[in-house]
Image (spheres, coloured by chain):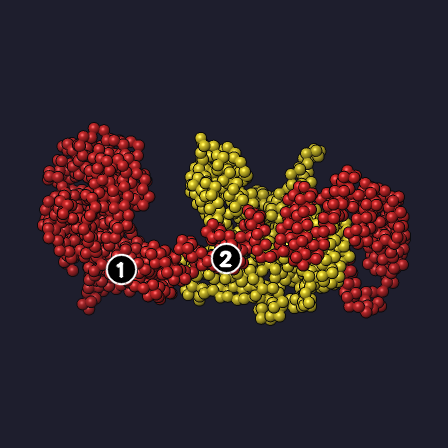
Chain colours: A yellow, B red
Amino acid sequence: MASHLFCGRVNLNILREAARKDLREFLDKCSGSKAIVWDEYLTGPFGLIAQYSLLKEHEVEKMFTLKGGRIPSAAVKNIVFFVRPRLELMDIIAENVASEDKLKPREFHILFVPRRSLLCEQRLKEKGVLNSFTNIDEYILDLIPYDGDLLSMESESSFRECYLENDQTSLYHAAKGLMTLQALYGTIPQIFGKGECARHVANMMLRMKREFAGSHTQILPVFDTLLLLDRNVDLLTPLATQLTYEGLIDEIYGITNGYVKLPPEKFAQKKQGEGGKDLPTEPKKLQLNSAEELYAEIRDKNFNAVGAALSKKAKIISAAFEERHNAKTVGEIKQFVSQLPHMQAARGSLANHTSIAELIKDITISEDFFDSLTVEQEFMTGVDTDKVSTYIEDCIAQKDPLIKILRLVCMQSVCNNGLKQKVLDYYKKEILQTYGYKHILTLKNLEKVGLLKPQSTMRNNYPTIRKTLKLWMEDANEQNPNDISYVYSGYAPLSVRLTQVLARPGWRSIEEVLKILPGPHFEERQQVPTGLHKKLLRCCRSRRGPL
Amino acid sequence: MAFVTANWNPLGESFYRKIELYEMGWNLKDGLRDCLVAAAPYGGPIALLKAHNRRSPSARPQLEIFSSSGLPLASFPWKSGMVKQLGWTVSDDLLCVQEDGTVLVYDLLGGFKRHFSMGNEVSQSQVLETKIFHSPYGTGVAILTGALRFTLATNIDDIKLRRLPEVPGLQGAPSCWAVLTQDRQSKVLVASGPHLFILDNTACTPVTPPGLSPQASSIVHMCVSFSYKYLALLTDSGHVWMGTSNLKEKLSEVDTKIKGSPKQMAWCRRPKSQQPSAVVMWDGLLLVVGECKETIQYHLEDDSILVPELDGVRIISGTHHELLQEVPGACEEIFKIASMAPGALLLEAHKEYEKESQKADEYLREIKEQSLLSEAVRQCVEAAGHEHEPETQKTLLRAASFGKCFLSNFPPEQFVSMCKDLRVLNAVRDYTVGIPLSHTQFKQMTLQVLIDRLVYRKLYLLAIEVCRYLKTPEYQGVSRVLKHWACYKVQQKEESDEVIAKAVSVKLADAAGISYSEIATKAYESGRTELAIKLLEFEPRSGEQVPLLLKMKKSPLALSKAIESGDTDLVYTVVMYLKNELNRGDFFMMLRNQPVALSLYKQFCKHQEQETLKDLFNQDDDHEELGNFYVKASYKEQRLEARIAHLQSAVDEYYKAKNEFSAKTTEDEMRLLRFQRKLEEEKDEQLVGFSLQDTMTTLLSVGLHKHAEQLYKDFRMPDKRFWWLKLKALAEKEDWEELEKFSKSKKSPIGYLPFVEVCIKHHNKCEARKYVAKVSPEQKVKAHLAVGDVEGAAEAAIERRNESEISTVLSRCSATTDHLLVERLNRAKATVPKKGSSITFTDGTLQSRRLLQEQRSERKRGYKLKRSCRP
């Protein structure tokens, strides 16, 4: 079920199992049959930890979505709320509890994810329902094992919270999550970081380390280095169009919590014959992770190399099916049959990915896609970043999706270390006239977080960064990559470059660039328990994505 | 070593021994006579209440607490009501059950902790008898009331009173009763004459012990084993019946031949016992009964009490403290006279070795020949654990160590940990400490609990030494002890705050995981706020500091600590607390100094209290944010007037903030809204809320060209966008005539390729062709291709001698139909100068751009996915 978590260098299943154990323990605390009322936002992240079957094993019989009014009737003993600690949700819960049938009372429980909150409990108290709850507990879900080499907080609004609203709650959760990680995988001896938020997280971690001092059991460190990077150190990368297979799926259809929803037409069962009437109308939902052999192989390939990989795979699979003609003895046939399920799964997966690749290709060969990619690449190479771009102008005139416009304008701003006031105002005016004046707040927000800014008197230092860190590689090899720049067909993500330099030869060699990038850079060492010091292996390096 | 067996007595197959633990240090005038006595298991303290029967008000009885060795721990006059029973909890607290059902709780040093009641029913009908028992849930109290009903509380830390059902036909007090723990439930077993009943929550069930001797007409005494697994009954005929406590199995029955009522009876059994056995005590006589007919008799000189333990019975008298137990297997094997067990031989071998006699070798050989040497070592180590005398322990351990020399790969852990355990045990058994724990008991109670017990006795130094010696993780060991010490220290009223704070910080400085807030809470509870604040400074967990700081009304400090912790929920908690505590002005002032708290509060207001948000911006003269606030407010309004009013306020604020752009834009917005409304009224066309662009599109689509034109001018829309807009709107309407007119109105700022493309998009090739000729040379090829004119495209491309364009056209030709064309193109392609060779760019940017363009067409080809991959 969680085989994708074993494949990386670190067995992340330990983390998942720890999370599952906590969940089971909580569910068992509410003895008897139960219904879960979900804060809808949480269902996705929870899907990465436990399927419905686990809940069912612990007598969860019904699931509802949290909404006002009365909870639908269900013959269960317990009602369990799975919620984020938010005041508006507390109001809904209070309403639910208050309108419960007094004649057939059910027991109520709350599980706060990822942390219980005094503020919320206070609110429940004010509403006069706090005492209605038998259990109020927290379910610490900070870093969720997403794939064999990836942990994610699955918290989509943290950038907004940190940079726009000055609310650093997610940083606290990040620090807590890293402490959990260290409790399971050993103290991480080296911490590097860049940026204000990274500094804050590291400070909290060191503080928490002191708080927990002595309580940690001795575990040989699995990670040797932790690198914390602020998102605003590298604003460019998320603005650029991703060009790997997985990246394009995300760009076009969006991947949430490991799932993608695709238009169903391409996936219609062809075997049903003539009956073309009942084409599925529900979008096709697919889980994407490394448990699927083929996906693991092609997910990170540049899309241009995916076709070749798929056709190679097709040949291998059809060759494997041909094998049956060679199977003569009973033993050979038995052997063949035993492999059948695996082969059929492989064939199914190939069919799926071929369909997805075709869907994507329809878009990547379009003129539009190509033109916007060209402009992106011009910006990234520093061409004409100081003038109004005709392409953007045209796109606005044609009222292309606003998000596309904003991405391009922000990218130009980032690649030019801010736009000239005249240029910026021109873009703003164009956007407001075309998409409506309400976006004045959108634009202000972009300026507040630094994605968009007027050029100050300082000269444009982006070229310095680009050259020092080799952000642009002319000869990116998409088929057999030897440099990370292949993922954007030329642009090497800044955060990856920072990581590479850190690994060798070290950040001291790029002091100048580090000074240009926002926020402090730092290095901390954490003492590994004395007994383990000698044993400390040079094992894997942890690389955590920017916040 | 013959003396080891001197105090052994045989009973059936096994031996029993009585070891003296202490000569009691107390000096009791009348011994234990006329005293209520309670001694806690696991070598716990002894409580004594003298002369509790005397009811003269002038003479208050004295309550005394002693260690197991008889050293006084506490003593105070009893001032409360008449005590029926004393008992100890699992955490060494003394319970005094009064006649009226009130239970008073004291700590081991006589400090009053709390009291609780066993319910109204008990206080009305008074307590007749009481038993204090230990269950898996903690310490429980069972009471038999004057109304002959039982009331039970299974855990005194979480009192849930249970009144048990009535016993049928019970006239007077039952002859005896006991509390059992079965199926995770506490039950009472009652003997009423010859009948036995089990009382649980719901029912009273009569039971009969299997095979109880028929001579008996009533059961006079009963006792349950330490583990609640076994039950012993004494009948009026003098028979002791032993069996399992579920009354399903009989183990043995022995006739004591004594018919008098005993003072006390207890199980004398240890884990892995060879036989069931119980100890019955009468005046001056102690009897051990087992499976066989014989019994062991001990004479008692003095009034004594029995204290059942996990592995034996302790006998406490006015002068002595002894342990009676079945001789453990390993000891028996080794010390039994003429034993040939491997352990015995090893001990002998070592003895000879010490004497430098060659016999040592003979003994060793004998063990080794049977390959029992490792067994021998194990026996010696185990036996050492069961011996009380350090000398005997040492002898056995030396023998084990000697034997180990002749073994390879013998795991050392057992030996090492036994040495360590014994060292700790000998230390706590010491007369001054007085905890006579056996090794078996120690293992059962765990080190954690032993440390706790030392801490309760305020033996901090010893506790720390034990932790250090056994290398307990700091967090569970030394730190915990230090915390207790500090909590005690802060209650010492005679010392000044500074001295205590300093002493605490110095002692606790290096200890990990200390909870200073707990210590500070203790200080605060004893009325020393200043000291508490000083101590909180040392607390590394800011989260822990905050609630206490709030309790002590140190809110500014609480706020900054909350912020330090990074836990936003904590910050919110303090902020909300402050909001209720302070007046608005002070509250805002305090937030102003704490930007983190302020921005969190703003977030809160944004969702919960919009008006407060405005006040906050006003206070800070943050006109920019106020402007934004009004803009947002305007979108919540349905009525246009209100919307415009809000926008006007926004404009004012933006001007105050010197944000010209925002002000002007918002004015534009107001202008647009007014225009839209006017037009809506005149032309009945839904417009309000549309963007400028959409408004114009709508106008054009309904043919209001003049109005669109006016907006274009009023809002200074760039030509290009206007042209695009109009072009698309007209094409959408398929107003081709107007489109043509428009194209000729003046030179198009967007060129003419869009005209071609838009027409094609609306499937009008014919119209599209009209504009091809007007397209600029650079875009000609594209235009031709768009209308499907490959030949025209070829002409244009060849004329322009552009390699990539020629290639594009080539890719659109099919080799069979356009045979000639393909040839021409190929020829032209060959003559085209190679990139960069003949054309020289003066401008570096231009050059890179050209390169890019070439790359771009290459990449474009690259994006064609091979379709061959379908299986």
Q: In the rendered structure, the residue with mark 1 lies on which chain?
A: B
Displayed quadrant of residue B516:
bottom left
At x 27% / y 34%, what residue is drawn?
B164
Q: Residues within 10 Å of mark 2 (few under 14, many from 20)?
A: some
Q: Position of residue A37 (x, y in %)?
A: 51, 40
Q: Which residue is mark 2?
A: B590
At x 58% / y 71%, what residue is drawn?
A508
Measure how far apart labels 2 and 1 are at the Cα level.
47 Å
Q: Nearer the viewer, residue A60 or B249?
A: A60
Local secondary structure at mark 2: helix
At x 25% / y 46%, what residue is drawn?
B104
Q: Which mark is residue B459?
A: 1
Judge whether B162 appears above or below B803 on screen: above
**Identity of the amino acid at label 2?**
Met
Q: Nearer the viewer, residue B206 or B747?
A: B747
Q: Nearer the viewer, residue B680 or B860?
A: B680
- Looking at the image, do the residues carrying marks 2 and 1 touch, with CB atoms under 8 Å apart? no
**Identity of the amino acid at label 1?**
Leu
Q: Nearer the viewer, residue A493 or B401?
A: A493
Q: Which mark is residue B88?
A: none
Q: Residues within 10 Å of mark 1 (few under 14, many from 20)?
A: some
Labels 2, 1: front one: 2
